[in-house]
Amino acid sequence: MKILQVGPIPPEIGGKSKGGVAIHVWELSTYLAKRGHEVSILADNFFYPEKIPMIKQKVKIYGLSASFLLRFFPNILSLSSILVKGIQLKRHLKGLMNLKNVIRDFFLYKYVIDEFKPDIIHVHHIQHRFPIVYSLAHNRIPIVTTIHSFHAIKFSSPSLRQRYHTLIASNLKLAENLIFISKFIQKELVKFFGEYQGRYWIIEPGIDIRKYYPVKKGIARPKIDLPGNGSVVLFIGHLIKRKGVYTLLEASKILKGKGIDLKIVVIGDGPELGGVKNFIAQSNIQDNVRLIRKVYTVDLLYYYNAADLFVMPSFSEGFAVVYLEAMLCGTPVIGISGIADEAIPSKDYGFLVPPGDAIALAESIENGLVRKWNREKIIEYARGFSWNEKIVKFERLYLDIVRRGRKAK
Protein backbone atom coordinates (compact mmCIF):
# COMPACT_ATOMS: atom_id res chain seq x y z
CA MET A 1 0.00 0.00 0.00
CA LYS A 2 1.19 3.53 -0.76
CA ILE A 3 0.68 5.65 2.36
CA LEU A 4 1.28 9.39 2.65
CA GLN A 5 1.70 10.80 6.15
CA VAL A 6 1.16 14.56 6.49
CA GLY A 7 2.75 15.90 9.66
CA PRO A 8 6.01 16.97 11.32
CA ILE A 9 9.22 14.98 11.72
CA PRO A 10 11.54 15.10 14.78
CA PRO A 11 14.75 17.18 14.88
CA GLU A 12 17.05 14.13 14.63
CA ILE A 13 15.55 13.47 11.19
CA GLY A 14 15.75 17.13 10.15
CA GLY A 15 12.55 18.68 11.49
CA LYS A 16 12.68 22.24 12.78
CA SER A 17 10.36 21.57 15.71
CA LYS A 18 10.00 18.78 18.22
CA GLY A 19 7.26 17.08 20.15
CA GLY A 20 5.33 13.87 20.55
CA VAL A 21 3.42 14.24 17.27
CA ALA A 22 6.67 14.39 15.26
CA ILE A 23 8.00 11.26 16.97
CA HIS A 24 4.67 9.50 16.38
CA VAL A 25 4.64 10.36 12.66
CA TRP A 26 8.21 9.19 12.18
CA GLU A 27 7.92 5.92 14.09
CA LEU A 28 4.57 5.08 12.48
CA SER A 29 6.11 5.68 9.05
CA THR A 30 9.24 3.61 9.66
CA TYR A 31 7.29 0.67 11.07
CA LEU A 32 4.94 0.75 8.08
CA ALA A 33 7.96 0.75 5.77
CA LYS A 34 9.39 -2.27 7.59
CA ARG A 35 6.12 -4.07 6.93
CA GLY A 36 6.64 -3.59 3.19
CA HIS A 37 4.49 -0.52 2.54
CA GLU A 38 5.64 2.37 0.40
CA VAL A 39 5.60 5.35 2.75
CA SER A 40 6.20 9.07 2.29
CA ILE A 41 6.00 11.95 4.75
CA LEU A 42 4.94 15.44 3.73
CA ALA A 43 6.64 17.36 6.53
CA ASP A 44 5.87 21.07 6.78
CA ASN A 45 8.56 21.51 9.46
CA PHE A 46 11.29 20.18 7.16
CA PHE A 47 13.40 22.60 5.10
CA TYR A 48 15.84 20.72 2.91
CA PRO A 49 18.45 22.72 0.96
CA GLU A 50 18.93 20.10 -1.77
CA LYS A 51 16.58 18.08 -3.94
CA ILE A 52 13.57 16.32 -2.46
CA PRO A 53 12.54 13.79 -1.42
CA MET A 54 15.15 12.75 1.10
CA ILE A 55 15.07 9.02 1.88
CA LYS A 56 15.75 7.67 5.38
CA GLN A 57 15.00 4.15 6.59
CA LYS A 58 13.09 3.49 3.35
CA VAL A 59 10.77 6.46 4.00
CA LYS A 60 10.59 9.32 1.48
CA ILE A 61 10.49 12.72 3.17
CA TYR A 62 9.15 15.73 1.29
CA GLY A 63 9.56 19.22 2.66
CA LEU A 64 10.26 22.76 1.59
CA SER A 65 13.45 23.37 -0.33
CA ALA A 66 14.82 26.23 -2.39
CA SER A 67 15.46 23.99 -5.40
CA PHE A 68 11.89 22.65 -5.22
CA LEU A 69 10.33 26.10 -5.17
CA LEU A 70 12.50 27.34 -8.03
CA ARG A 71 11.92 24.29 -10.19
CA PHE A 72 8.23 23.75 -9.65
CA PHE A 73 6.82 27.20 -8.97
CA PRO A 74 3.71 27.52 -11.18
CA ASN A 75 4.03 29.42 -14.40
CA ILE A 76 2.19 32.70 -14.97
CA LEU A 77 -0.74 30.98 -16.69
CA SER A 78 -1.61 28.89 -13.63
CA LEU A 79 -0.71 31.52 -11.06
CA SER A 80 -4.17 33.13 -11.10
CA SER A 81 -5.97 29.83 -10.33
CA ILE A 82 -3.49 29.05 -7.56
CA LEU A 83 -4.07 32.53 -6.09
CA VAL A 84 -7.86 32.07 -6.13
CA LYS A 85 -7.53 28.71 -4.39
CA GLY A 86 -5.14 30.20 -1.86
CA ILE A 87 -7.57 33.00 -1.00
CA GLN A 88 -10.38 30.48 -0.55
CA LEU A 89 -8.24 28.36 1.79
CA LYS A 90 -7.06 31.40 3.73
CA ARG A 91 -10.69 32.32 4.40
CA HIS A 92 -11.45 28.77 5.49
CA LEU A 93 -8.42 28.87 7.79
CA LYS A 94 -9.86 31.97 9.52
CA GLY A 95 -6.72 33.98 8.90
CA LEU A 96 -4.61 31.61 11.02
CA MET A 97 -2.13 31.33 8.11
CA ASN A 98 -1.00 34.16 5.86
CA LEU A 99 -1.72 33.96 2.12
CA LYS A 100 1.93 33.39 1.19
CA ASN A 101 2.20 30.29 3.38
CA VAL A 102 -1.21 28.98 2.32
CA ILE A 103 -0.20 29.15 -1.36
CA ARG A 104 3.22 27.67 -0.62
CA ASP A 105 1.72 24.73 1.29
CA PHE A 106 -1.06 24.21 -1.24
CA PHE A 107 1.44 23.97 -4.07
CA LEU A 108 3.76 21.67 -2.09
CA TYR A 109 0.89 19.39 -1.09
CA LYS A 110 -0.34 19.27 -4.69
CA TYR A 111 3.09 18.38 -6.01
CA VAL A 112 3.66 15.61 -3.46
CA ILE A 113 0.19 14.06 -3.87
CA ASP A 114 0.48 14.09 -7.67
CA GLU A 115 4.06 12.80 -7.54
CA PHE A 116 3.58 10.03 -4.96
CA LYS A 117 0.01 8.99 -5.90
CA PRO A 118 -0.89 7.51 -2.50
CA ASP A 119 -3.63 4.96 -1.86
CA ILE A 120 -4.46 6.76 1.38
CA ILE A 121 -3.45 10.00 3.09
CA HIS A 122 -3.05 10.16 6.86
CA VAL A 123 -3.18 13.74 8.18
CA HIS A 124 -1.93 14.56 11.67
CA HIS A 125 -4.00 17.27 13.35
CA ILE A 126 -7.36 18.56 12.18
CA GLN A 127 -6.38 22.25 11.97
CA HIS A 128 -4.39 23.71 9.06
CA ARG A 129 -3.10 20.57 7.29
CA PHE A 130 -6.47 18.89 6.85
CA PRO A 131 -8.30 21.51 4.69
CA ILE A 132 -5.39 21.75 2.25
CA VAL A 133 -5.29 17.97 1.83
CA TYR A 134 -9.08 17.84 1.58
CA SER A 135 -9.17 20.48 -1.15
CA LEU A 136 -6.72 18.43 -3.22
CA ALA A 137 -7.69 14.82 -2.54
CA HIS A 138 -11.38 14.67 -1.58
CA ASN A 139 -13.36 12.26 -3.82
CA ARG A 140 -10.04 11.08 -5.23
CA ILE A 141 -7.98 9.62 -2.38
CA PRO A 142 -9.26 8.42 1.04
CA ILE A 143 -8.22 10.60 3.98
CA VAL A 144 -7.92 9.71 7.66
CA THR A 145 -7.05 12.33 10.27
CA THR A 146 -5.54 11.83 13.71
CA ILE A 147 -6.55 14.26 16.46
CA HIS A 148 -3.66 14.43 18.92
CA SER A 149 -4.97 17.21 21.17
CA PHE A 150 -7.17 20.28 21.50
CA HIS A 151 -4.42 22.47 22.95
CA ALA A 152 -5.11 25.19 20.38
CA ILE A 153 -8.55 25.65 21.90
CA LYS A 154 -7.61 25.14 25.54
CA PHE A 155 -4.47 27.24 25.79
CA SER A 156 -4.69 29.98 23.16
CA SER A 157 -5.77 33.56 23.80
CA PRO A 158 -9.57 34.09 23.79
CA SER A 159 -9.60 35.55 20.27
CA LEU A 160 -7.42 32.79 18.83
CA ARG A 161 -9.39 30.18 20.75
CA GLN A 162 -12.60 31.18 18.98
CA ARG A 163 -10.99 31.14 15.56
CA TYR A 164 -9.51 27.69 16.16
CA HIS A 165 -12.87 26.43 17.42
CA THR A 166 -14.63 27.70 14.28
CA LEU A 167 -11.95 26.22 12.02
CA ILE A 168 -11.98 22.79 13.68
CA ALA A 169 -15.79 22.71 13.68
CA SER A 170 -15.76 23.38 9.92
CA ASN A 171 -13.14 20.70 9.33
CA LEU A 172 -15.03 18.12 11.39
CA LYS A 173 -18.02 18.52 9.05
CA LEU A 174 -15.75 17.51 6.16
CA ALA A 175 -13.70 14.76 7.83
CA GLU A 176 -15.06 11.26 7.28
CA ASN A 177 -12.49 9.22 9.21
CA LEU A 178 -10.88 10.19 12.53
CA ILE A 179 -8.35 8.57 14.84
CA PHE A 180 -8.18 9.67 18.48
CA ILE A 181 -4.97 8.88 20.36
CA SER A 182 -6.94 8.29 23.58
CA LYS A 183 -10.44 8.04 24.99
CA PHE A 184 -9.69 11.33 26.75
CA ILE A 185 -9.29 13.14 23.40
CA GLN A 186 -12.48 11.56 22.04
CA LYS A 187 -14.36 12.81 25.10
CA GLU A 188 -12.87 16.29 24.67
CA LEU A 189 -14.19 16.42 21.11
CA VAL A 190 -17.69 15.70 22.39
CA LYS A 191 -17.22 18.35 25.08
CA PHE A 192 -16.15 21.05 22.60
CA PHE A 193 -18.13 20.11 19.48
CA GLY A 194 -20.77 17.53 20.32
CA GLU A 195 -21.00 14.01 18.91
CA TYR A 196 -18.95 13.35 15.79
CA GLN A 197 -21.03 11.93 12.93
CA GLY A 198 -18.27 10.17 10.97
CA ARG A 199 -16.33 6.97 11.58
CA TYR A 200 -13.66 6.99 14.25
CA TRP A 201 -11.16 4.75 15.99
CA ILE A 202 -9.16 5.07 19.22
CA ILE A 203 -5.56 3.95 18.78
CA GLU A 204 -2.97 4.96 21.37
CA PRO A 205 0.52 5.86 20.11
CA GLY A 206 2.99 3.03 19.84
CA ILE A 207 6.38 2.92 21.49
CA ASP A 208 9.71 1.58 20.24
CA ILE A 209 10.55 -0.99 22.91
CA ARG A 210 14.10 -1.34 21.57
CA LYS A 211 15.03 2.13 22.90
CA TYR A 212 14.08 1.68 26.56
CA TYR A 213 14.77 -1.28 28.82
CA PRO A 214 15.96 -1.93 32.40
CA VAL A 215 19.50 -0.92 33.36
CA LYS A 216 20.75 -1.29 36.93
CA LYS A 217 20.92 1.99 38.86
CA GLY A 218 24.55 1.28 39.69
CA ILE A 219 25.28 1.48 35.97
CA ALA A 220 22.77 4.16 34.93
CA ARG A 221 23.55 6.83 37.54
CA PRO A 222 27.33 7.10 36.93
CA LYS A 223 26.60 7.43 33.20
CA ILE A 224 24.75 10.72 33.86
CA ASP A 225 26.71 11.88 36.89
CA LEU A 226 24.08 11.21 39.54
CA PRO A 227 24.99 9.99 43.03
CA GLY A 228 24.58 6.27 43.65
CA ASN A 229 22.74 6.85 46.92
CA GLY A 230 19.62 8.91 47.57
CA SER A 231 16.28 9.18 45.81
CA VAL A 232 15.84 10.64 42.33
CA VAL A 233 12.61 11.98 40.81
CA LEU A 234 12.62 12.67 37.07
CA PHE A 235 10.60 15.15 34.98
CA ILE A 236 10.89 15.36 31.17
CA GLY A 237 8.83 17.84 29.21
CA HIS A 238 8.61 21.13 27.36
CA LEU A 239 8.84 23.93 29.92
CA ILE A 240 5.38 25.42 29.53
CA LYS A 241 2.86 25.97 32.28
CA ARG A 242 0.46 23.19 31.29
CA LYS A 243 3.16 20.56 31.86
CA GLY A 244 2.86 21.16 35.61
CA VAL A 245 6.54 21.71 36.32
CA TYR A 246 5.74 24.40 38.92
CA THR A 247 3.51 21.95 40.79
CA LEU A 248 6.46 19.55 40.95
CA LEU A 249 8.83 22.26 42.17
CA GLU A 250 6.30 23.33 44.82
CA ALA A 251 6.10 19.69 45.92
CA SER A 252 9.89 19.66 46.11
CA LYS A 253 9.73 22.61 48.56
CA ILE A 254 7.23 20.71 50.70
CA LEU A 255 9.37 17.58 50.76
CA LYS A 256 12.50 19.57 51.61
CA GLY A 257 10.61 21.16 54.50
CA LYS A 258 9.82 17.67 55.79
CA GLY A 259 13.50 16.76 55.70
CA ILE A 260 13.16 14.25 52.85
CA ASP A 261 16.38 14.02 50.90
CA LEU A 262 15.88 13.62 47.16
CA LYS A 263 17.07 15.02 43.86
CA ILE A 264 14.57 16.38 41.33
CA VAL A 265 15.96 16.16 37.79
CA VAL A 266 14.09 18.44 35.36
CA ILE A 267 14.89 17.90 31.67
CA GLY A 268 13.37 20.41 29.30
CA ASP A 269 13.48 23.78 27.62
CA GLY A 270 10.87 26.29 26.61
CA PRO A 271 9.28 29.66 27.36
CA GLU A 272 9.10 28.98 31.11
CA LEU A 273 12.84 28.29 31.48
CA GLY A 274 13.49 31.68 33.08
CA GLY A 275 10.48 31.33 35.36
CA VAL A 276 11.58 27.87 36.45
CA LYS A 277 15.07 29.14 37.26
CA ASN A 278 13.63 32.02 39.30
CA PHE A 279 11.26 29.69 41.17
CA ILE A 280 14.14 27.37 42.08
CA ALA A 281 16.28 30.27 43.33
CA GLN A 282 13.49 31.99 45.26
CA SER A 283 12.39 28.71 46.86
CA ASN A 284 15.96 27.90 47.90
CA ILE A 285 15.82 24.40 46.38
CA GLN A 286 18.93 24.72 44.22
CA ASP A 287 20.57 21.80 46.00
CA ASN A 288 17.53 19.62 45.40
CA VAL A 289 16.90 20.36 41.71
CA ARG A 290 19.06 19.72 38.69
CA LEU A 291 17.81 21.59 35.61
CA ILE A 292 19.00 20.24 32.25
CA ARG A 293 17.92 21.97 29.04
CA LYS A 294 18.82 19.24 26.57
CA VAL A 295 19.69 15.56 26.69
CA TYR A 296 20.62 13.30 23.80
CA THR A 297 17.96 10.71 23.08
CA VAL A 298 20.36 7.83 23.74
CA ASP A 299 21.01 9.19 27.26
CA LEU A 300 17.32 9.23 28.20
CA LEU A 301 17.61 5.49 28.79
CA TYR A 302 19.97 6.17 31.71
CA TYR A 303 17.86 8.96 33.17
CA TYR A 304 14.73 6.78 33.20
CA ASN A 305 16.66 3.96 34.87
CA ALA A 306 18.42 6.27 37.34
CA ALA A 307 15.06 7.58 38.62
CA ASP A 308 13.04 6.07 41.44
CA LEU A 309 9.94 7.84 40.13
CA PHE A 310 9.00 9.58 36.90
CA VAL A 311 6.67 12.55 37.55
CA MET A 312 4.91 14.69 34.97
CA PRO A 313 1.89 16.46 36.53
CA SER A 314 0.69 17.83 33.17
CA PHE A 315 -2.73 19.51 33.07
CA SER A 316 -3.40 18.35 29.50
CA GLU A 317 -2.02 15.51 27.39
CA GLY A 318 -3.39 13.54 24.49
CA PHE A 319 -1.47 10.47 25.53
CA ALA A 320 1.95 11.06 27.07
CA VAL A 321 4.33 8.41 25.73
CA VAL A 322 6.98 9.53 28.24
CA TYR A 323 5.06 7.64 30.95
CA LEU A 324 5.46 4.45 28.93
CA GLU A 325 9.14 5.14 28.23
CA ALA A 326 9.75 5.32 31.97
CA MET A 327 7.68 2.18 32.60
CA LEU A 328 9.69 0.22 30.02
CA CYS A 329 12.64 0.78 32.34
CA GLY A 330 10.61 -0.45 35.33
CA THR A 331 10.18 3.05 36.75
CA PRO A 332 6.76 3.84 38.31
CA VAL A 333 5.11 7.11 37.29
CA ILE A 334 2.90 9.89 38.67
CA GLY A 335 0.44 11.85 36.55
CA ILE A 336 -2.74 13.88 36.84
CA SER A 337 -6.11 12.21 37.42
CA GLY A 338 -8.48 12.63 34.49
CA ILE A 339 -5.50 13.22 32.18
CA ALA A 340 -3.15 10.26 32.61
CA ASP A 341 -5.69 7.57 33.57
CA GLU A 342 -5.23 5.59 30.36
CA ALA A 343 -1.45 5.47 30.78
CA ILE A 344 -1.68 4.74 34.53
CA PRO A 345 -4.71 2.45 34.90
CA SER A 346 -3.98 1.30 38.47
CA LYS A 347 -1.67 1.79 41.44
CA ASP A 348 0.38 -1.16 40.25
CA TYR A 349 2.06 1.25 37.80
CA GLY A 350 2.00 4.59 39.61
CA PHE A 351 -0.23 7.22 41.14
CA LEU A 352 -2.71 9.84 39.96
CA VAL A 353 -3.08 13.18 41.76
CA PRO A 354 -5.44 16.15 41.33
CA PRO A 355 -4.24 18.88 38.94
CA GLY A 356 -2.16 21.63 40.54
CA ASP A 357 -2.23 20.00 43.98
CA ALA A 358 1.36 20.23 45.21
CA ILE A 359 0.50 18.80 48.63
CA ALA A 360 -1.08 15.68 47.12
CA LEU A 361 1.83 15.36 44.69
CA ALA A 362 4.38 15.62 47.51
CA GLU A 363 2.50 12.93 49.44
CA SER A 364 2.41 10.64 46.40
CA ILE A 365 6.14 11.13 45.79
CA GLU A 366 6.86 10.33 49.42
CA ASN A 367 4.71 7.19 49.26
CA GLY A 368 6.13 6.16 45.89
CA LEU A 369 9.70 6.33 47.15
CA VAL A 370 9.07 3.84 49.97
CA ARG A 371 6.67 1.50 48.17
CA LYS A 372 7.90 -1.88 46.93
CA TRP A 373 7.03 -1.87 43.24
CA ASN A 374 6.68 -4.91 41.00
CA ARG A 375 8.95 -3.56 38.29
CA GLU A 376 8.57 -6.62 36.08
CA LYS A 377 4.80 -6.01 36.00
CA ILE A 378 5.35 -2.35 35.11
CA ILE A 379 7.64 -3.31 32.23
CA GLU A 380 5.24 -5.93 30.91
CA TYR A 381 2.37 -3.45 30.92
CA ALA A 382 4.37 -0.86 28.93
CA ARG A 383 5.47 -3.47 26.39
CA GLY A 384 1.81 -3.92 25.48
CA PHE A 385 2.05 -0.54 23.68
CA SER A 386 4.83 -1.77 21.38
CA TRP A 387 4.73 -0.62 17.77
CA ASN A 388 4.81 -4.29 16.84
CA GLU A 389 1.28 -4.51 18.26
CA LYS A 390 -0.02 -1.09 17.20
CA ILE A 391 1.15 -1.18 13.59
CA VAL A 392 -1.24 -4.02 12.76
CA LYS A 393 -4.17 -1.85 13.89
CA PHE A 394 -3.10 0.94 11.55
CA GLU A 395 -2.70 -1.47 8.64
CA ARG A 396 -6.18 -2.89 9.12
CA LEU A 397 -7.66 0.59 9.48
CA TYR A 398 -5.99 1.84 6.27
CA LEU A 399 -7.13 -1.24 4.34
CA ASP A 400 -10.71 -0.84 5.56
CA ILE A 401 -10.83 2.84 4.57
CA VAL A 402 -9.30 2.16 1.13
CA ARG A 403 -11.74 -0.69 0.44
CA ARG A 404 -14.70 1.46 1.43
CA GLY A 405 -13.43 4.23 -0.82
CA ARG A 406 -13.21 1.87 -3.77
CA LYS A 407 -16.74 0.56 -3.17
CA ALA A 408 -18.06 4.13 -3.03
CA LYS A 409 -16.63 4.79 -6.50
Image: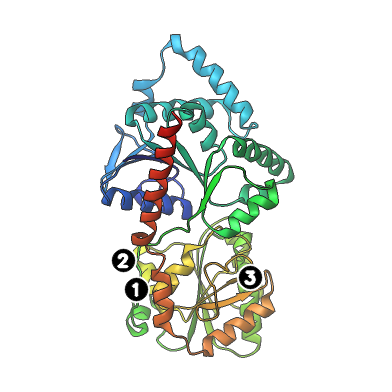
Residues tagged 1 and 2 counted as in contact (Cβ below 8 A): yes
Quarter holding the C terminus?
A: top left
- Name the residue rendered at 66%, 73% in the picture: 282
Q: Is residue 110 above or below residue 285?
A: above
Around disc 2, counting alpha carbons within 10 Å, would you say few (fewer than 14), some (14 to 19), or many (20 or more)?
few
| Disc sitting over residue 213 in the figure | 1
Disc 3 to disc 1: CB gap under 8 Å: no
Give the quadrant of residue 206. bottom left
Q: Which residue is mark 3?
A: 337
Residue farthest along the top direction in this orientation: 77
Give the numbered dot on residue 210: 2
Figure label count: 3
| Horizontal side, residue 349 vs residue 152: left or right | left
Element carrying mark 3: loop
Mark 3 residue type: Ser
Q: Is residue 305 visible?
A: yes
Image quarter (top left, top right, bottom left or bottom right) of the N terminus: top left
Image location of residue 326, percent across then percent down: 44, 72
Q: Amino acid at mark 1?
A: Tyr
